[in-house]
Image: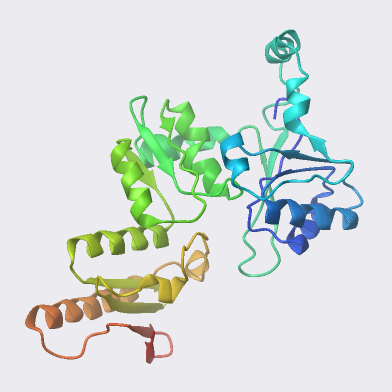
Amino acid sequence: MRLGAVYIPATIQLTKKDIIYRCAAASVQAIFSITEKDIYEAAAKALPECPDVRIAGFVRSDPKEEASEPIFQAQEGWLDLNEQIALISDEEAKEFRNKNPEAGGEDPMLLYFTSGTTGMPKMVLHDFNHPLGHIVTAHYWQQLGPHDLHISVADTGWAKCGWGKIYGQWICGAANFVYDMDRFDPARLMEKLSYYKVTTFCAPPTIYRFMIQEAARKASIPLVSGAIAGTSGQVTTIFPQDKGFELIYGKNYEKNLKGIETRVGNLSFCAFFVASIQASEVIKLLLNRGQILRNRLFIADLMSNSYEIMDLK
């Protein structure tokens, strides 16, 4: 950022095809990867088809993490950024720190690619004023201050990482809690939040669902879950011993997917309808009468008045 170079955050879920597309669309000239095998290999395989890229480099994992990973072997021509940084003297570092930044204000700073829900991912360019806009996010929505310890569950390649835990949050003086998870584990995440006394928490809706399911399991009570998107909704009942959301969203859910609600919103009549189905499930559980939606998913499309019950076993 201080150099004035525009950077493009990239999620670890990108494939070779995704990387080639982004490099071509944005005329990318430099690409940097971590050394985890699948991620580095995707970047390395994409490189021959990215003619604009002049520099390729990698950042090594923490030594403790690296010891548990497959032995990393960089391809010829890739820069080891850890080695390059080690070559910089204290005097050079201080000189760079005290030097005025090369860019600012309305100069381009950051380029995100959209998730590609309704077509190929599109480029969205932000200038150096972009972080200031998220003071509103941190101060008024998350209500953060200097005494807060905040976590946002988001891959650094997603825009949510920028607006959810970096720019406005640091400007408001909050400390960031970062939990590097190999895979999403709701029980372990809740343990960390409790142990380190995290004060504010932000995550995609499905992360909340898995955490609520874990809390219900610990309390040995069933969970009646409802979700809506546009004019569609779904309801299921999950007992403590059931797989539950894993059968709907997959195991170790991590993605922040966006559906039709990003275009049409979540309509009120759909919310009321799904809530009424949930209420009927709760009453059947309390009275121990009727057929409940255990290991089954009730799906409704109120625009077409179609209803379906899907077996999740």
Of all residues, the one furthest to the right in this rendering is 51
Residue 230 seen in render: no
Residue at the image position 84 percent from the left and 49 percent from the top: 27
The image's colour scheme reads rainbow
294 or 6, which lies in front? 294
Q: Position of residue 171 (x, y in %)?
A: 48, 27
The residue sitting at the top extreme is: 91
Quadrant in the rendering for residue 304: bottom left
Q: Give how far across and how far down residue 284 sits, in percent.
A: 14, 83
Q: Is residue 101 above or below residue 132?
A: above
- Among the 4 quarters of the image, the one containing residue 29: top right
Give the answer, above or below, for where 164 lies relative to 279.
above
Q: Is residue 140 above or below residue 289?
A: above
Is 270 situated above or below 38? below
Relative horizontal placement of residue 63, taking residue 200 as reference (left or right): right
Q: Residue at x 33, y 58 (%)?
A: 211
Point out residue 23 in the picture as x, y percentages from the top left corner. Answer: 81, 52
Q: Residue at x 72, y 40 (%)?
A: 7
Q: Which quarter of the picture shows residue 30?
A: top right
If the image is split into quadrants, where does the N terminus sit? top right
* Side (left or right) of 154 relative to 141: right
Residue lying farthest to the left in this orientation: 287
Q: Give the percent coordinates (x, y) of residue 225.
A: 29, 71
